[in-house]
Image: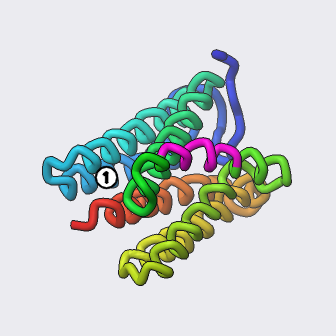
Amino acid sequence: MTDYVDGYCERVGPGLWGEPLNSLSNLAFLVAAVLVWRLADGDRTGRLLAGLIGLIFVASSAFHLLATRWAAVADSVAILVFVLVYAVLFAREHWRPRHAWLAAPGFLALTVVTALLGGGLYLGALIGLAAFAAVLAFERDAYWTHFAVAGAVFALSLSLRTLDRDVCGYVPVGTHFLWHLLNGVVLYLVSRALLRP
């Protein structure tokens, strides 16, 4: 679990600052966490979301600073926990509360299926954002636009994440840092849509 991981274009070698832009761009998650905390204004759901975004900041920072397998696992787990908790919270607002817990295994199943079909681990999240936008649009809820915009931003960030290794010859720093910056925006938008300030 302490094996060195060199998975990004920007990484120039082992050591804390082997990925300076990827490491610094994690601050987008910290900014999103602080903004959501302030938006929550004492609301427990908002504080939970802010705390989970803060966890993503810590885990992703650890991964891009340390570049070890255990940090990569922590990074993925932090993202997965946010997505699963968010799916349940969204379902609780729009379905019968006693059935809301089904959103977590439902999302896990979607993630596994899309990964097996070659869509990677994040395609399920993109489909989820589109589904949330569709549910709210059907309910004529004005917040559907938050999910539509979040979905568009996430589609762009996912494309940039996917292109990272392919552009190394042209863009030595890669594009992964843009994945962080844009996902900070996505996390803020979806949290705002749930909290409805």
Name which residue lies at 45% across and 75% down.
136
Magenta-colored stretch includes residue 15: no
Left or right, residue 119 beside residue 149: right
> Farthest left residue?
41
Residue 46 picture location, percent across and down: 27, 50
Name which residue lies at 31% across and 52% down.
31
Left or right, residue 88 beside residue 113: left
Q: Which residues are magenta?
A: 101-109
Left or right, residue 8 beside residue 184: right
Residue 167 picture location, percent across and down: 74, 60
Residue 177 picture location, percent across and down: 54, 54
Looking at the image, residue 55 lies above or below residue 150 = above
> Farthest right residue?
117
Name the image quarter holding the N terminus. top right
Magenta-colored stretch includes residue 102: yes
- Residue at numbered disc 1: 31
Circle 1: element type: helix
Name which residue lies at 68% across and 64% down.
159
Looking at the image, residue 163 lies above or below residue 51 = below
